[in-house]
């Protein structure tokens, strides 16, 4: 019975992912970002984006 539940769950999840990718379309995929040199210093915009993504600026007025 457990095997049936696991297989059914995998089929449902796989089907929903397949339908989602079909609805999104192949031509609307996000373009890949250019790879940066890991040792290069970050720009101000990149630093702000990283801080926002980490939640460090959650309660700041500038992030509203």
Image (cartoon, rainbow, N blue to C red):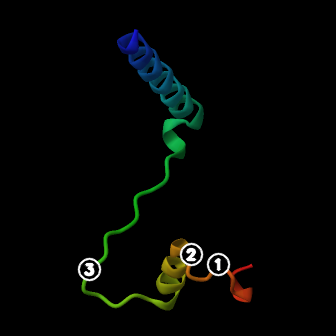
Q: What is the distance, in whole Å, between disc 1 and disc 2 at their CAs?
A: 5 Å
Which residue is at a point 64% across and 78% down the rendered structure image?
58
- Residue 8 — which label? none
Q: Which residue is mark 3?
A: 38
42 vs 54, nearest the viewer: 54
Side of 31 where 22 appears, left or right = right
As drawn, 20 above or below 64: above
Q: Which residue is mark 1?
A: 58
Q: What is the distance, in whole Å, between disc 1 and disc 3 at their CAs?
A: 26 Å
As drawn, 64 above or below 14: below
As drawn, 1 above or below 30: above
Q: Earlier in the sequence, mark 2 or mark 3?
A: 3
Q: Residues within 10 Å of mark 1 (few under 14, many from 20)?
A: few
Image quadrant of residue 39?
bottom left
Q: Pointers 1 and 2 in contact (CB under 8 A)?
A: yes
Estimate the x, y position of residue 32 in percent, counting from the top left: 40, 58
Estimate the x, y position of residue 44 in percent, counting from the top left: 50, 91
Estimate the x, y position of residue 41 in percent, counting from the top left: 34, 91
- What secondary structure is marked by label 3? loop
Which residue is at a point 45% across and 56% down the rendered structure image?
31
- What secondary structure is marked by label 2? loop
37 vs 12, nearest the viewer: 12
Q: If the image is split into quadrants, where does the C terminus sit?
A: bottom right
Q: Earlier in the sequence, mark 1 or mark 3?
A: 3
Q: Residues within 10 Å of mark 2 (few under 14, many from 20)?
A: few
């Amino acid at each position: 019975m457990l095997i049936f539940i696991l297989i059914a769950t995998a089929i449902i999840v796989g089907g929903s992912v397949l339908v989602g990718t079909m609805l999104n379309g192949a031509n609307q995929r996000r373009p890949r970002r250019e790879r940066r040199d890991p040792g290069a210093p970050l720009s101000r915009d990149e630093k702000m984006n990283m801080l926002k993504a980490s939640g460090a600026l959650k309660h700041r007025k500038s992030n509203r």
